[in-house]
Image: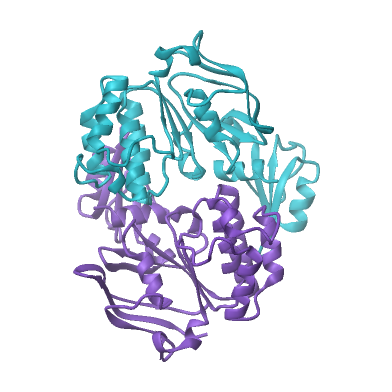
Chain colours: A purple, B cyan
Amino acid sequence: METLKVSQITKKYGRQMILDDISLTIQPGKIYGLLGRNGAGKSTLLNLIVNRILPTDGTIKLGNDEINDNDVALTQFYLMSEVSLYPKHVTLKQMWEMADLSYGSFNFNRARRLLKEFDIQDENVKLGSLSTGLQTAAKLIVALSVNANYIFLDEPILGLDANHRDVFYQELLKAYEENVKTYVLSTHLIEEIQQLVEHVFILDNEKITVDADVEDLLGEMFVISGPAMLVEEYVKDQNVLGTRSLAGIKTAFVRGALSEEKEIPDQIQIKHPDLQQAFIYLTNK
Amino acid sequence: METLKVSQITKKYGRQMILDDISLTIQPGKIYGLLGRNGAGKSTLLNLIVNRILPTDGTIKLGNDEINDNDVALTQFYLMSEVSLYPKHVTLKQMWEMADLSYGSFNFNRARRLLKEFDIQDENVKLGSLSTGLQTAAKLIVALSVNANYIFLDEPILGLDANHRDVFYQELLKAYEENVKTYVLSTHLIEEIQQLVEHVFILDNEKITVDADVEDLLGEMFVISGPAMLVEEYVKDQNVLGTRSLAGIKTAFVRGALSEEKEIPDQIQIKHPDLQQAFIYLTNK
C-alpha cells in the first residue's frame, strides 16, 4: 500500500472558502480520526480525496500518482457517506454485488455475518425500506466488506443505537486485525472512537489545526481542578484553553508542558483530558 | 411539585404491542434517563405522558389527578421531541413568545444567553432556515427556558457537535442548580449523560426491565477481564450477560454480587461498567 498525500488543497464555492491550503499525509495501515465542528468541511475534504468533487487548487497523490487521472487509485478508495448514492429500491444483496463488480473480491461471508449482528433479517430487503439506523448499518456492512485499501467513513454512526455502534466498533477492529487497511473516521462521537484511532486531524476555520498521534496530543494537555483560588494561582502562567466552574470546583484546561518547578497543592487534581474534552477546548470559539 | 405516576399503561397500534403494562413513578426534582434501543417505544411513552396520544389501557396521574382530563397538569409538562410542532417559517423569538403564552414567565434572558452559547446570531432567524444541529439547539433553548415543572427531552442532541452537546449538558445542570425541576432525558448517547442522571428506566421488549438509581445499577454489575482461561473459571457460576475477546484478553460482563469466597487471580481485573456498557449488555439479544 502507498502513502496518500494531500498537498495544499484549497476548495471554494463561489467566494466562500471551505478549505484553505490543507496539507496532510495518510500512512497505509493506520486508523485515523478526522474531527471538526459542524460545517468545518470534513465531508468536503473526504469527497475531494475520493475524487467525487474537484479542488479549486492543490493536488492529491497516492504514491506518485495524482488521484484525479488515475482509475487504479480510485478503485482503492471507498467512501461511506451520509448521502446515499444508492437508488431506494436497491436490495442489500445488490449493494454487495455492486461493490463486488467495482472493487472485486467482496467479502460476502463477512457481509452475511454482519447482517445478523445488526439484526437485519434478510439480504433481499430494500435499502429504502429500512429505518435511518438500519440504512446506516447496511452501508457499514458494505464499507467493512469491500475490497478497498482505504476506507473513509463519514458519520458512520448516524441513527445507530448504542448496541449497534458497539457492533460497528468491534467489527472494525476485527476487520483490521484480519486484514490491515487504512481507515479514516469522521464522527461527532469522539469519546467513542478514542480507543480506535491512532492519529487525529482537526479541521477548524478551513485549516488543519491539529495533526498528531492521539497519545502525543493528550499527553501535552491537562485538566486541572480544585478550589478556584488554588487553580487560578497554579495555572496563571500556563496556556489556558478554557475553564469551567460547578459547585465551587474550578476546572482549567491547559495545553503545553506544566512547569516542573511549581509545587502542586494537595487539593488540586491534575489529569489528562479524554479526546472529546480535548477537542471541545481546542475548537471552542 | 407532585409525583407523576404511570400505572399499567398499555399501547397498541392495531395488533402491534408497543408498550405492555408499563408502570413507573417519576419523583419531582430529579433528573431521569429513559433508555432503550431503537424502536423500543421511548417516544411513544413520552407522548403518552404529555397526552399527545392516548393509551390503549392504563392511567397517568400527576398527584391525584389524571392528566388526560386536567389542563393544569398539562401546563406543567413540556416535551421537546424530534418531530417539530412548529411551522417552518416561525422565528426563534416567536417560539419563545408561544412558550410564554402557553406556560407563562418564559425566561427570555436565559434564552438570549443560550442563543450566543449555541452560536446562533439572531433571534429573528427562521427555525426552518437552520441546519439540523441548530434546529435542535433552537428547540433546546425553549426547553431550558420554559416555565414547566416537568421537562421531557426526546433525543435532545440530534445533529449537535461535541461542543454544542457540551453546552447543553452544562446548561441543563446550571438551570437545574438555579431552579430544581424534573427532567427526563431519552437519548442514545448514554455515556455522555451518565454524570447527569440519577435514575434510569430501561425499556426493552415493550416492558420496563430496569428501574434503578444509576449508582445501584452499576454497583451490582462487573466487568471482569484477563487471560481467557482464568476469566472463564472465575465467572463460571455467575450471571454472565456477555463476553468478548480481543488480542488474547477475555472480558466478561456479570450482573449480581460476586462470590466473596472465591479468590481473585492476580491477572484478573474487576471493575464496574459505565452506564453505556451496562445498557448494551442488558439489552443485547
| Vertical side of A233 occupied by B23: above or below | above
Residue at position x 39%, y 22% from top? B181
Residue B278 point in image, percent of width and height? 61, 42
- Position of B265 relative to B49 (above/below): below
All told, the count of numbered labels is 0
Could you say where residue A19 lies in the image, as x and y percent from the top left? 28, 70
Q: Foreground residue, A35 or B150? A: B150
Q: Residue at x 40, y 76 (%)?
A: A49
Judge from the rendering whether residue A158 lies leftward or rightward of residue B88; answer left or right: right
Residue A184, placed above or below residue B142: below
Quarter of the figure with residue A210: bottom left
Q: Quadrant of residue A66?
A: bottom left
- Residue in the picture at 52% in, 26% down: B53
Which of B131/A279 is in front? B131
Q: Quadrant of the N terminus of chain B?
A: top left
Where in the figure is residue B44, as x and y percent of width and height? 55, 32
Q: Indicate whether B185 appears above or below A126.
A: above
> Which residue of the protein is positioned furthest toward the bottom in this rendering?
A64
Say whether residue A218 is left or right of residue B94: right
Q: Looking at the picture, how far across and down is residue A216, in whole percent?
A: 40, 66
B165 or B268, which is in the foreground? Answer: B165
Residue at figure coordinates x 28%, y 44% from the top left: B118
* Residue A33 seen in render: yes
Whether residue B272 can be seen here: no
